[in-house]
Image (cartoon, grey):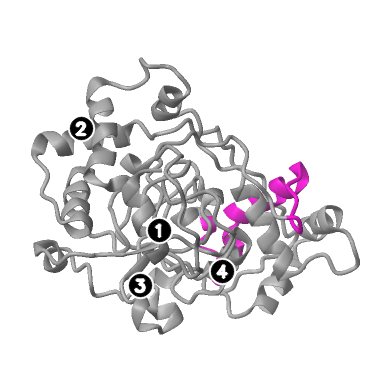
Amino acid sequence: MNVLLKSVLPIFFGVTLTVLSVTASAFEVLPEVAPAPADNPTTPAKVELGKQLYFDQRLSVNGTVSCNSCHSVMANGTDNRPVSVGVFDKRGGRSAPTVWNAAFLSTQFWDGRAASLEDQAKGPILAGVEMGMPSEAAVVARLKQIPGYVTQFKAVFGGKDSLTYDNVARAIAAFERTLITPNSPVDRHLKGDKSALSAAAKRGMTLMEKVGCTSCHTGPNYSGPASLPVGKGFFQRFPSFPSKYDKQYDLKADLGRYEVTQAAADKHMWRVPTLRNVALTAPYFHNGSVPTLDEAVRVMAKSQLNKVLTDAEVSDIVAFLDGLNGEFPTITMPRLPETPNGTLLEE
């Protein structure tokens, strides 16, 4: 952990921390298995159920939107839009973050309002601009009309009342914990393969520390320390320094975590996003306003570190970020349970 990170850690969290010693590297290898909470152990049957739910558009009010619509696991875990398209062509105000490696985040959503993947999974289904279901009860009632789901929930969770909204979220979260992209060129480099990164990427790796990027983007997910308790997010103010980019990309219109806490100190505070696969998830930032990665690097350098990078420095940092593209596992489309002799959807 570099000296800059040591000096700024206490301002990032909603908890009091003991200042850490300078021992750990700013660059870490991504684990190939994500930890699961004690009350939601990962099992193959639960993962398969969660995968079906993740792809099932019937979890939206008019049957047009699934989790995968905005967080496509057939690609980079986003929809590559500034903001996503929900039911009835509604639009939200924030860009969809990638679901790949989200299991390694200590808190979910841009503003950290969900403590876990389970909590996060409950939100979009009921959000009016996303999947638009009117209530948890309405979701459960619809799923109980699908015989295949009733059978699977009973087999996975047991008990008389196994098909609950909490268990819907548990199943989806179990599937999401399998969405890991290990063995990136950076990971291979850290494990000893010195040919895994180009000379430019190695220069970019050095610049990440020298410029100060790793004061926030550290840990195996490059989104903050892995040791944080679940729900205690790693936050930073964005933008931290005024610049031309504030107006150019409308960076300050959204008040960020303040919308959750109503605490003045949380204005423009955001959960630090992962840098893994960042080269694939344009456009960038909470409002999807920046179309290219090289421009995003320039914006971050000025807005967060008050530094102006040369074109060569930007190119080298981008080369390093390209090296964080991991190996995506093959995802096959699931067969969804049918509703024989009728439909659940109406005009």
Magenta highlight on residue 139: no
Q: Residue 312's spot in the image, x, y percent?
A: 11, 33
Q: Nearer the viewer, mark 1 or mark 2?
A: 1
Give how far apart the Cα atoms at labels 3 and 2 are. Answer: 30 Å
- Which of the labelled discs sits on residue 256, or is there none? 3
Estimate how packed mark 4 is, as few (under 14), some (14 to 19) or many (20 or more) residues with alpha carbons within 10 Å.
many
Q: Nearer the viewer, mark 4 or mark 1?
A: 1
Which stretch is magenta?
38-67
Report helix, strand or loop for mark 1: helix
Q: Nearer the viewer, mark 4 or mark 2?
A: 2
User: Between disc 3 and disc 1, whose residue precedes?
Assistant: 1
Q: Amino acid at mark 3?
A: Gly
Write the residue at 32% across / 76% down. Answer: 267
Estimate how packed mark 3 is, as few (under 14), some (14 to 19) or many (20 or more) residues with alpha carbons within 10 Å.
many
Give how far apart the Cα atoms at labels 1 and 2 are. Answer: 27 Å
- Which of the labelled discs sits on residue 316, or is there none? 2
Report helix, strand or loop for mark 3: loop
Report helix, strand or loop for mark 4: helix
Estimate how packed mark 2 is, as few (under 14), some (14 to 19) or many (20 or more) residues with alpha carbons within 10 Å.
many
Question: What residue is shown with label 1?
Answer: 9
Are dots 3 and 1 in contact, CB under 8 Å?
Answer: no
Give how far apart the Cα atoms at labels 4 and 1 are. Answer: 34 Å
Q: Nearer the viewer, mark 3 or mark 1?
A: 1
